[in-house]
Amino acid sequence: MVACYTNAGIEAEVLFESNGHASFFFPHSGPTVLQANEGCSDLHLSQNVSLGWAAALGEVDLEELRAEATAVTACVEERTGEDFGDLSYDEFGYLTEHGQQTRDAAFEYQDHQPWGRCRNDLGYEEEYKAETRAILECVETRAGEDFGELDFDDTGHPTEASQLTLRKAGTYQGDQAWEACRTELGLPDRTITSDN
C-alpha cells in the first residue's frame, strides 16, 4: 500500500496497531489523496484481503461468515421473491466477484431493509445487542446516571430514541467512559450503531 501511494506521488506512513491492523497516515489531504487511497485499496486491500487479514488474526470465522451470508441471502430472496444469483466462493472460501455481486445485491435491496430484518430474525444481531446493552449499563454505572431506554427495531438497530440514549452515553466524558467500558468488558471495537 505504501509503495502504491509513493507511485501515485503521495507521501504515506503505515502504523501497525496492537491488534495487528494497519493504519495509514498522510501529511497532506485532498482529492488526490482520496483518489490514490481508493485506487490502492482496490488493488491491495480488497474486501477479501481485509477479511483474510481478520481471519488470520482470529477475529472472524470464515465458515460462520459463509453460513451467515448464505442464510441471510436466502431469507431475503424468500421474503422479496427476488433471485439475486448464486453465492459462489473460490477455493480459499472467499466470495468470488460474482458471489460478492450477489451478496451486495441482496444487501442493498430496498435500502437494506429486508437484509436487516432477516439478520435480526435469524439471530445475527443478538451479539451486537448484548454488547451494546452491556456497555451502556457500564457507562451508566460509572456516571451514576440513566441515559435513557435502549430498544431495537425489527432490523436489530437502535430506535431513534435509543440512538439519542447511545449518543449521550457514547459522548459522556468525551467517549472515554464508553471506550473504557468496552475495553473492560473485553469487547471488540465497534461503532455505537450497527451498520451490518
Image (spheres, rainbow, N blue to C red):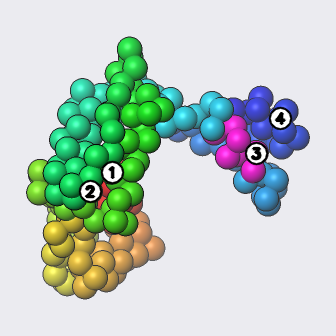
How would you rate the neighbour count of disc 4 (Cα within 10 Å): few for under 14, some for 14-19, many for 20 or more? few
Circle 1 SS class:
helix
Q: Which residue is mark 3?
A: 36
Q: Quadrant of residue 118?
A: bottom left
Amino acid at pointer 1: Ala
- Residue nearest the observer in this picture, 16 or 73: 73
Which numbered disc, 4 or 1, marks the residue that appears first in the sequence?
A: 4
Instruction: Tell me, yes or no, if residue 185 can be seen here.
Output: no
**Circle nearer the viewer, 3 or 4:** 3
Query: In the rendered structure, does residue 38 fall within the stretch colored magenta?
Result: yes
How would you rate the neighbour count of disc 2 (Cα within 10 Å): few for under 14, some for 14-19, many for 20 or more? many
Circle 3 SS class:
helix
Amino acid at pointer 3: Ala
**Circle nearer the viewer, 1 or 2:** 1
Amino acid at pointer 4: Thr
**Circle nearer the viewer, 2 or 3:** 2
